[in-house]
Image (spheres, helix red, strand yellow):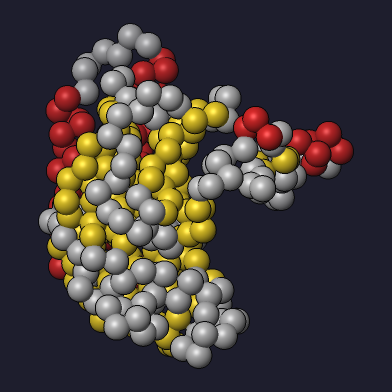
Amino acid sequence: MKKTFSMKYKSVWEISDSKSEHQSFNTWIRHNQDTNIGKLEDDLIGVRGLIGGINNDLLFITYSPKNIKVIDLKTMKPLTGIKNNIIPIFGIDYHCLVPLTMNNEKLINHFILFCRNTGSLIKYDEQNKTFHYQKLPICPGLNNSYSFVHLYDFIFSFGGFNSKFERIKNVYKYSMKEKTWNECKFTLPMEISDSFAILSGNDKNVHVIGGKNAKGKRQEMHVSVNVEQLFEKSEFLKMAKMYEKEMNRMKLERPYIIPFEKARMIEDEKKNKYENTNTKIGKQIERIG
């Protein structure tokens, strides 16, 4: 029997001392049977999920053998009438699923999936409830069971199994803009599979946690990778130029008078985000140089 749990998360450093707030956050809530995700016959081992939708209220889950399901987060029930919801990839599990980004901004309802010898760009037409797929190049050195993060329009993979089903310590990166794979000069200190990777809040480090070592035993080492080690200086220079170009475009397109305060705040927030990102990249270039 499948069970579904959800949690309203909030950092422990931001929660007040009131008992009611402690109870409303960071507690796993079990859903009733009507809102459980997945049927009894569904194989959810190695499942992946992402939040999407125009209103950020849809959960997209991909699971074996080649299924994609859309859950309405308001009701916790799957949407009906979805067309073309069979992924043209057979046997997906423990795969890579990330949002497609452009200039480090997520494109609504666009996702990238890699598993074994197949890659796919998944697009969801929310109005017509239809999926569309586009083939993407794969990394010959990768199979599955690797951890991954995405940053600055790149996907980074850590460890996993190669085509010979051997655990590796290599790090690969995929450029969403150029649709190319490259091996990073940096490697992990050990062979690893089935780990989990997450970016730090300031995007300066990737933490690779858990998994199995070369002998298939539990991996106990926590690896912290500096993001600067994953990029070439030329890539940082490209990104800096890209963000500078985007900032200039925004300055030219911005009207002299913005009638609504909310619109002005959104515009300023977006501009500050690009400026902060460009400053961050500039500092990283200086350190590498």
Seen as rendered, the residue at the extreme top is 259
The one of 272 and 147 positioned closer to us in this rendering? 147
Q: Nearer the viewer, residue 241 or 54?
A: 54
Residue at the image point whose x is 62% and y is 38% from the top: 36
Q: Within the image, what quadrant is residue 50 found in?
A: top left
* In this view, 9 is above or below 43: above
Residue at 20%, 64% in the rendered image: 138
Regarding residue 239, the answer to whether it shows in the image is no
The image position of residue 135, as x and y in percent, is: 16, 51
Residue 181 left/right relative to 189:
left
User: Which residue is more in the foreground, 268 or 64?
Assistant: 64
Quadrant housing the C terminus: bottom left
**Up-down relation of residue 80 to residue 60 (above or below):** above
**As drawn, is 278 to the left or to the right of 94?**
left
Percent position of residue 93, x then y: 41, 60
Where in the figure is residue 122, as x and y percent of width and height?
27, 43
Residue farthest along the bottom direction in this orientation: 215
Q: Residue at x 81, y 39 (%)?
A: 23
